[in-house]
């Protein structure tokens, strides 16, 4: 993990938030490369879960949330983790997650296990961030309280009827949302894995009660396929069928999809059958019917819901961990070297192609490069680089995870005859093999590779 965290900073994937001021614990900023990976991930999720499906529509709900929404959903009363304080080292720890935590005075000790540790009884700590709304609001006025949402799901439930009425969807159908969520985690840790501000990608898939269990299994398969399609190998994905005692009381079935991170096998996503709990609670508290009427069967009921809920930041972290590789290579003169290469799937790679002139002083090579750049950049993120030896430029792109490099040389500009004029070398990051391609084939080839 240390190597990965350091590469993330050195190459501009992820930085600690407010690092200049000592850092804001549990918050992260995505740098120029990280933001591209994250956007690619969200775009692909949206494409698979909204664009390519007739039965799912999108929503972008507000982050600031009415307190009654979160009271009805149970978050105000119960969205908490058990917390203990140590009277000796003054540390605060999540009581159900002490393994891997360190005593503040003696880091080799797990809290509670050192000779001087003196833990209090566990008490519940609510994870929601509360704020007061309105310029004239008194901070003690209970009516002015609002919350930063702890999950994107609740605005989907509260807008269920509006979406149903405006989009005229028929069951089963889903509402998808990608957006920020906030939890005041007691111990944020493992880099971005457990943060206080993070993004979720959620679908609430509404259905008839008879279909809930079957659809939960279907969603599990669809989500596993998704992870494979973005480059996480099936053998590193694990499914935990969450036992009843560990499930939310309203859930009839929950699968956790876990990934082998360097710090252990940990949850990426939950696929939960939440029954009709949420809609029923909002119907009761909001006082308006959230029932669905099936015109064919004349049946009226509160729909059940299956929820695949993925963490965007956790998935980016999994992609980065999976991509990281160090490889021993030997050059033509027999010299060995270590190549660091980020083997991202081209679909999520931050930069899709880098474009180099062999010689930066050659005006024709530079002109052709810029023409290629102008053509490709309307469709994908590309990068022009002319500094240093070509071999070094390749290495920099390997570390960035750029799957293809395009080099314009003397053949391209016709200096060695007509045969290779208007062709370039097309170099593959993983195999380091090169092929010769006509410039006119670059765009269709790249579009096929990154789709
Ligand atoms: N609406 C259901 C829900 O929010 P969850 O299991 O609490 O369920 C879903 O969260 C996903 O959100 C998790 O599987 C994880 O990927 C991500 N997530 C939750 N808490 C997180 C945190 N503190 N930091 C980063 N990601 C988090």
Image (cartoon, rainbow, N blue to C red):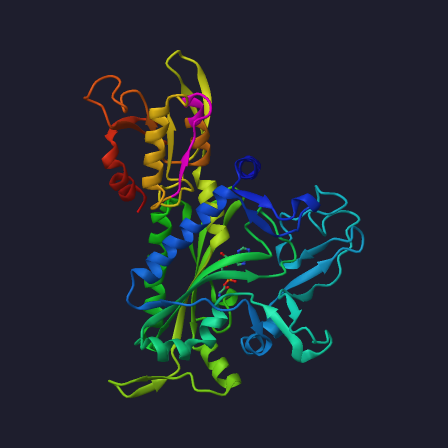
Residue 328 relative to residue 211: left or right: right
Position of residue 12 measured from the top left corner of the image (x, y, whole percent)? 53, 39
Query: Is residue 390 within the magenta segment?
Result: yes
| Viewer-nearest residue: 427 or 223 | 427
- Residue 183 in sight from this viewpoint: yes
Q: How many marks?
A: 0
Position of residue 87 measured from the top left corner of the image (x, y, whole percent)? 80, 56
State whether residue 338 is above or below residue 80: above
Position of residue 102 measured from the top left corner of the image (x, y, whole percent)? 69, 46
Residue projecting furthest to the left = 419
- Residue 343 in sight from this viewpoint: no
| Viewer-nearest residue: 280 or 150 | 150
Based on the displayed image, in which of its 4 quarters is residue 371 positioned? top left
**Residue positioned 68% across, 55% down in the render:** 93
**Residue positioned 62% across, 47% down in the render:** 100
State whether residue 266 is above or below residue 438: below
Residue projecting furthest to the top = 333
Query: Is residue 374 within the magenta segment?
Result: no
Position of residue 368 measured from the top left corner of the image (x, y, whole percent)? 32, 30
**Residue positioned 57% across, 53% down in the render:** 194
State whether residue 96 is above or below residue 400: below
Q: Read off the magenta span.
A: 381-393
């Amino acid at each position: 993990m240390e190597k990965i965290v350091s590469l993330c900073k050195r190459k501009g994937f992820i930085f600690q938030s407010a690092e200049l001021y000592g850092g804001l614990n549990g918050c992260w900023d995505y740098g120029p490369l990280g933001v591209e990976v994250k956007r690619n991930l969200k775009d692909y999720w949206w494409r698979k879960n909204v664009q390519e499906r007739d039965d799912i529509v999108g929503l972008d709900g507000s982050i600031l949330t009415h307190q009654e929404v979160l009271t009805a959903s149970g978050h105000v009363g119960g969205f908490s983790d058990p917390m203990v304080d140590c009277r000796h080292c003054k540390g605060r720890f999540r009581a159900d997650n002490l393994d891997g935590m360190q005593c503040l005075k003696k880091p080799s000790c797990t809290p509670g296990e050192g000779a001087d540790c003196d833990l209090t009884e566990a008490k519940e700590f609510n994870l929601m961030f509360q704020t007061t709304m309105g310029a004239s609001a008194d901070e003690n006025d209970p009516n002015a309280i609002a919350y930063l949402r702890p999950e994107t799901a609740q605005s989907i439930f509260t807008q269920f009827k509006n979406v149903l009425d405006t989009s005229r969807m028929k069951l089963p159908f889903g509402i998808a949302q990608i957006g920020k969520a906030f939890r005041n985690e007691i111990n944020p840790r493992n880099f971005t894995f457990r943060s206080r501000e993070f993004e979720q990608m959620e679908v609430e898939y509404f259905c008839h009660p008879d279909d809930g269990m079957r659809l939960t299994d279907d969603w599990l398969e669809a989500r596993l396929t998704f992870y494979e399609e973005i480059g996480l190998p099936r053998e590193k994905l694990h499914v935990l069928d969450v036992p009843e005692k560990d499930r939310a009381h309203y859930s009839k079935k929950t699968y956790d999809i876990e990934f082998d991170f360097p710090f252990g096998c940990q949850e990426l996503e939950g696929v939960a059958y939440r029954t009709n709990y949420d809609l029923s609670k909002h119907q009761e508290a909001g006082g308006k019917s959230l029932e669905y009427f099936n015109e064919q069967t004349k049946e009226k009921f509160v729909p059940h819901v299956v929820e695949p809920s993925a963490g965007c930041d956790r998935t980016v972290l999994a992609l980065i961990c999976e991509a990281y590789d160090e490889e021993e290579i030997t050059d033509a003169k027999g010299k060995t070297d270590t190549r660091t290469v980020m083997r991202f799937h081209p679909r999520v790679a931050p930069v899709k192609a880098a474009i180099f002139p062999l010689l930066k002083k050659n005006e024709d090579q530079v002109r052709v490069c810029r023409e290629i750049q102008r053509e490709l950049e309307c469709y994908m993120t590309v990068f022009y680089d002319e500094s240093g030896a070509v071999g070094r430029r390749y290495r920099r792109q390997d570390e960035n995870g750029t799957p293809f490099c395009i080099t314009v040389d003397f053949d391209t500009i016709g200096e060695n005859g007509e045969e290779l004029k208007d062709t370039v070398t097309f170099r593959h990051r993983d195999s380091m093999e090169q092929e010769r391609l006509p410039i006119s084939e670059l765009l269709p080839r790249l579009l096929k590779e990154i789709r």
